[in-house]
Image (tube, coloured by chain):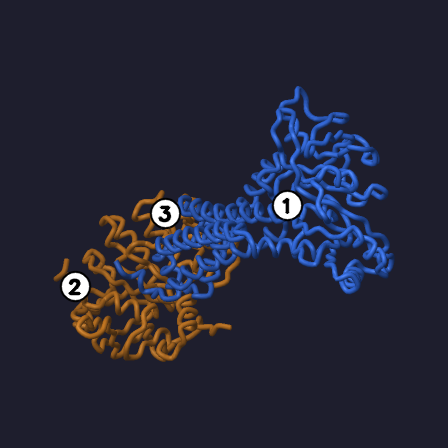
Chain colours: A blue, B orange
């Protein structure tokens, strides 16, 4: 009987297309919005992927990776002295103004790396030599910086070119690839000492300390030891990611805004699919009554309705996820809006679609269960 | 696990026996008594017509005898099985195994082909799809629609649709065939063809056909006619009385 249930469903073209369309729209909206939201969340932790380290030591009141509360320079040595720390280096991060050739100021994310080790260096160099950061006034910039700081130049900013950071000359010795930052500012890497020259002078300048555990110890064990012995806060990468994302959830309207759209997609899916499927059941009520009269049990009719609902659900889910992926491929090269379609997002959408299908089918099943087979004898 | 109702028999030749059946619809002021202590019997091998004015309870009688409608009181026995004692699921199984239906509006599923429509009772009974479609095709051949196997109901005339409905009602070899106004939507010639098919089906051993009708053109095919009025059996006509009734209503 199940193949006949599918033929009954697909034979009614208008209803079938509307059902698939409603579920496609719901799946697309939920997946696309969730993926953009995940993309934004991934931007908030891009620091940790652009400057990789196992342990991030910060001032004790810092809540997330994009926040800086300066520490004393001597804190680096205090961390180095903690048992289990293999090495620890100073790390500078701050938002400064860089001047483009047309005279306009552009905000940049300035990163200062420990000159001897270059720990926290960008993951991929596209051109130039990172080692040359040890020379005075040198910087490595990312591709977004080329785009932003090339305004007013006859050709894009390249190796050997100069620009100003906070009225000081910076010479480009390398171009790197980075993950985009939550604030949307380009990355400019320099040495720690040079960063202190670029940045306005303050009493305390050390933003963070990057550390590694000794072999045989986990980052988590060493982070707890650092906290205990120095009174500073030490995060492993997963801990810092979680703390940063928690901060975004608690302190910004971004999650609420995206959740509203995702819930809207779900509600539209429930409403359109539920109503259309119920109307499909009502239009077929005499045929379902005839099947009941001929000996179809309520359980069989319920299974047929579930099959019909899940068939349109599966098709709508597939098309919706496909369209969301197409959207992702279209926007990823431009990097805007952020887009991260992972397995978790697909599972969340699948669960929502399953719920919508069950809801739609239950409306029909309830109607059919109450249906008296004798309806077929009525005019 | 469902009960097998395919080999049950009444002690006498009665295929259907309804005794003192009462059925009411609604409550309070809107309460309507559709059947009042009605008694009705059909024998095997009979084509039994139930006639009477609109609203006299014919269709309600048909519905309760077929086990598609619950009744308030009285006993109903079909091929020796007392429907009163059965659970809803068992009544469904009983219908699936023993009853074929022909409806006034055909009730063919418009998105299925004629073969698929006819195969429904077989599939409900657990027959494999290929076998069900082969047997359905053979049944359609018997009712003269061998060349319409892949057509959809919308491509057929009223008479052809009713023949598909007859094929669907007969394909699983039910013992009781219940028809609700099978000729009312058909012209005279087509109506006679349909009645010939049903009369032929009624003559098969161990089977009977009950037809509710307003159509006096069908009276000549009956072995017995029950006339109803106000929810009760007014008169039952057989043999000589039947011939007089037909002559009067021609």
* Callout 2: SS: loop
Q: Residue at x 72, y 34 (%)?
A: A141
| Structural crowding at the residue carrying mark 3, measured as other residues with C-alpha within 10 Å and reported as few (<14), some (14–19) or many (≥20) | many
Q: Which residue is labeled 2 in the image?
A: B53
Front one among A176 and A323:
A176
- State the image coordinates of residue A155 (x, y, percent, origin top left): 68, 21
Asked if one can make out residue A140 in the rendered structure from this viewpoint, the answer is: yes
- State the image coordinates of residue B78 (x, y, percent, origin top left): 35, 73
* Callout 3: SS: helix
Q: Residue at x 30, y 71 (%)?
A: B64
Tell me the distance, in whole angstroms, between the alpha carbons under discs 2 and 1. 79 Å
Tell me the distance, in whole angstroms, between the alpha carbons under discs 3 and 2. 31 Å
Asked if one can make out residue B240 in the rendered structure from this viewpoint, the answer is: no
Instruction: Please check whether the numbered discs 2 and 1 fall on a single chain.
Output: no
Q: Which residue is labeled 1 in the image?
A: A43
Q: Chain of mark 1?
A: A
Q: Which residue is labeled 3 in the image?
A: B153
| Structural crowding at the residue carrying mark 1, measured as other residues with C-alpha within 10 Å and reported as few (<14), some (14–19) or many (≥20) | some
- Which of pointers 3 and 2 lies earlier in the amino acid sequence? 2
- State the image coordinates of residue B35 (x, y, percent, origin top left): 22, 73
């Amino acid at each position: 009987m199940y193949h006949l249930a599918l033929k009954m469903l697909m034979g009614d073209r208008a209803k079938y297309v509307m059902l698939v369309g409603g579920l496609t729209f719901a799946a697309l909206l939920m997946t696309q919005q969730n993926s953009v939201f995940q993309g934004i969340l991934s931007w908030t932790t891009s620091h940790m992927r652009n400057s990789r380290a196992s342990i991030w030591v910060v001032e004790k009141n810092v809540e997330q990776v994009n926040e800086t509360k300066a520490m004393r320079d001597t804190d680096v040595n205090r961390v180095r002295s903690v048992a289990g720390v293999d090495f620890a280096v100073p790390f500078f991060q701050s938002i400064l103004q860089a001047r483009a050739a047309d005279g306009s100021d552009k905000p940049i994310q300035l990163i200062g790396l420990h000159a001897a080790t270059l720990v926290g260096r960008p993951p991929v160099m596209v051109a130039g030599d990172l080692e040359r950061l040890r020379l005075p006034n040198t910087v490595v910039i990312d591709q977004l910086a080329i785009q932003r700081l090339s305004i007013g130049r006859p050709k894009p900013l390249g190796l050997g070119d100069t620009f100003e950071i906070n009225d000081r000359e910076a010479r480009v010795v390398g171009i790197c690839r980075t993950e985009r930052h939550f604030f949307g500012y380009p990355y400019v890497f320099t040495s720690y000492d040079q960063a202190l020259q670029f940045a306005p002078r303050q009493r305390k300048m050390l933003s963070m300390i990057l550390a590694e555990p000794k072999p045989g110890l986990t980052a988590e064990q060493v982070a707890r030891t650092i906290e205990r012995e120095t009174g500073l806060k030490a995060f492993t990468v997963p801990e810092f990611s979680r703390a940063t994302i928690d901060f975004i959830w608690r302190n910004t309207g971004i999650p609420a805004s995206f959740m509203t759209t995702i819930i809207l997609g779900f509600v539209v899916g429930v409403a359109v699919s539920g109503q259309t499927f119920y109307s499909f059941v009502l239009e077929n009520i005499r045929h379902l009554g005839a099947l009941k009269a001929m000996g179809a049990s309520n359980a069989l009719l319920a299974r047929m309705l579930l099959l019909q609902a899940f068939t349109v659900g599966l098709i709508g889910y597939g098309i919706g996820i496909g369209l969301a992926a197409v959207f992702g491929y279209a926007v990823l090269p431009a990097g805007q809006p952020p887009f991260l379609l992972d397995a978790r997002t697909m599972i969340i959408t699948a669960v929502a679609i399953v719920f919508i299908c069950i809801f739609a089918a239950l409306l029909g099943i309830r109607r059919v269960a109450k249906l008296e087979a004798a309806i077929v004898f009525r005019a | 696990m469902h009960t097998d109702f395919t080999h049950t028999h009444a002690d006498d030749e009665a295929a259907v026996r309804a005794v003192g059946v009462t059925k009411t619809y609604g409550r309070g002021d809107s309460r309507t008594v559709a059947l009042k202590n009605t008694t009705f019997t059909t024998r095997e091998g009979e084509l039994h017509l139930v006639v009477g004015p609109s609203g006299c309870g014919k269709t309600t009688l048909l519905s309760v005898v077929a086990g598609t409608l619950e009744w308030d009181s009285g006993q109903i026995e079909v091929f020796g099985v007392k429907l009163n004692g059965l659970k809803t699921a068992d009544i469904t199984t009983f219908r699936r195994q023993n009853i074929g239906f022909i409806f006034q509006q055909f009730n063919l599923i418009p998105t299925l082909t004629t073969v698929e429509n006819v195969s429904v009772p077989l599939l409900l009974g657990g027959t494999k799809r290929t076998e069900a479609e082969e047997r359905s095709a053979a049944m359609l051949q018997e009712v003269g629609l061998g060349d319409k196997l892949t057509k959809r109901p919308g491509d057929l005339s009223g008479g052809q649709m009713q023949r598909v409905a007859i094929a669907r009602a007969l394909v699983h070899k039910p013992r009781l065939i219940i028809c609700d106004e099978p000729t009312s939507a058909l012209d005279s010639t087509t109506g006679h063809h349909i009645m010939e098919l049903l009369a032929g089906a009624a003559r098969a051993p161990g089977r009977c056909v009950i037809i509710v009708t307003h159509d006096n053109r069908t009276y000549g095919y009956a072995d017995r006619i029950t006339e109803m009025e106000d929810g009760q059996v007014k008169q039952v006509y057989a043999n000589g009385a039947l011939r007089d009734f037909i002559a009067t209503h021609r």
